[in-house]
Amino acid sequence: MSGKDQSIVSKESLLSTKPGKQILKQGMFKSKGYKLFKKYKEEAENEFPNFAERFTDDLLREIKSDNSANSTQQEFSQEVGSSELILQDSQIPDIKSKLENREILKDRVLRILNSNFVKMTFPVFNALYDAAAEFSGIHDPKMRQNLVDGHIIAIDLSEPMDRIVDKDEDLDYLDDYKLMNPYILKIARNKISMGGEEVLKEFEEGFKDARVGQYIDTKLKSKPTSITEEEMNQCYKKYRAVMGTAGRNMALAKRPLGEIFYLGMARAAESVGCGNEIEDSIKNEFVKIPSWPLYYSLLSNDVQKGFELTLKKSNLYLSDARLALELLPDGFSHREFLEFLFLTVEHYNHFWYNRLEKEKIWSKLSSNLPK
């Protein structure tokens, strides 16, 4: 795991969960899954600075060459269905001029790349692409870089967009992010399109679904006490669409592997979503709206039970992800990598649930529930 908080994978933390102990055991005996996971983690960490440089250069090129930044902002607003994410016309010249300074732009790029989602996903996409290339016998390093970069950049777009909407960090840079957003999407599209028409089509459908999920998430904030199970499933499109589509495209959207990767990545992402809701509830000391903990807590009138059921929900998602392993072809080169990956997801969820139990903030969480 290559996230921002390395304490989650300290020896003490791994010993605190059953899947964590299995991770330590595999590390001790140097299992194939552990060695593959370590290889891709180290590759991603070494490559990350080069990726950030490429991303900055591409972004700088797009910003400098755009002679109609006002139109670019408006088109982006229409596509994502929100005027909150763009600048007013009068703000554009100054912000554009500022971001044409490469050092300033690189600073903003590194800020939005400082994300668990981005850092934990990079090694996974590289591994999936290599696995599909091994299966098909077609190895293309340039295609690998374009597809992985493109999907990581598309995922990274959620960072500035979320920060603009939530207004909970980087307050001094939100206007800069507004200018950057359309160009980030354009760069992602350009790179992903290198995979061909079908791959780009899958991305476009996934991006649209992710926006639907995000829209439902926003809408549910205004009616927290009447959220339904179906609405929560629709809300979770934001996880399924992003990771599932990227998984499918690492296999160039070709069946059967593309569909198997979709299933595994979509369900694993939903499982991580549950863990993330538990983590956020600890950090903020209120139950996230909307979330599975909120849904279950309100129905059972018991916050502790709400989180207990959320952990069970995360395990159900992960069971579905592990079904994908049973669909892989015989002798599949990266099966053990995926088994180890799912073990890290399980540890992440259990780690935060155990932390919540130790925090003993049930009464605070209960008192902060929406009435």
Image: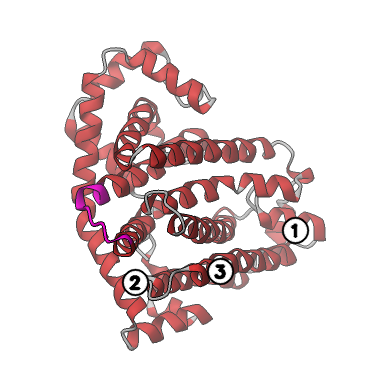
- Can you give x and y, in whole percent of width and height, for residue 246 in the image? 42, 49
- Can you give x and y, in whole percent of width and height, for residue 179 in the image? 35, 25
Residue 279's disc is none
Q: Is residue 334 visible?
A: yes
What crowding class fits label 2: few (fewer than 14 Cα within 10 Å), some (14-19), or many (20 or more)? some
Q: Earlier in the sequence, mark 3 or mark 1?
A: 1
Q: Earlier in the sequence, mark 2 or mark 1?
A: 1
User: What predominant SS class does the magenta segment belong to?
Assistant: helix
Is residue 265 shown left or right of residue 145? right
Residue at the disc numbered 2:
333
Seen at 45% across and 76% down, the residue is 13
Q: Earlier in the sequence, mark 3 or mark 2?
A: 3
The range drawn in magenta is 136-145
What crowding class fits label 1: few (fewer than 14 Cα within 10 Å), some (14-19), or many (20 or more)? many
Q: Is residue 247 above or below residue 190?
A: below
Is residue 153 shown left or right of residue 314? left
What crowding class fits label 3: few (fewer than 14 Cα within 10 Å), some (14-19), or many (20 or more)? some
Residue 323's disc is 3
- Can you give x and y, in whole percent of width and height, for residue 74 in the image? 44, 17
**Pointer 3 with pointer 1, Cβ within 8 A:** no
Q: Quadrant of residue 298?
A: bottom right
Q: Give, as a three-letter code, the residue at label 2.
A: Ser
Residue 297's disc is 1
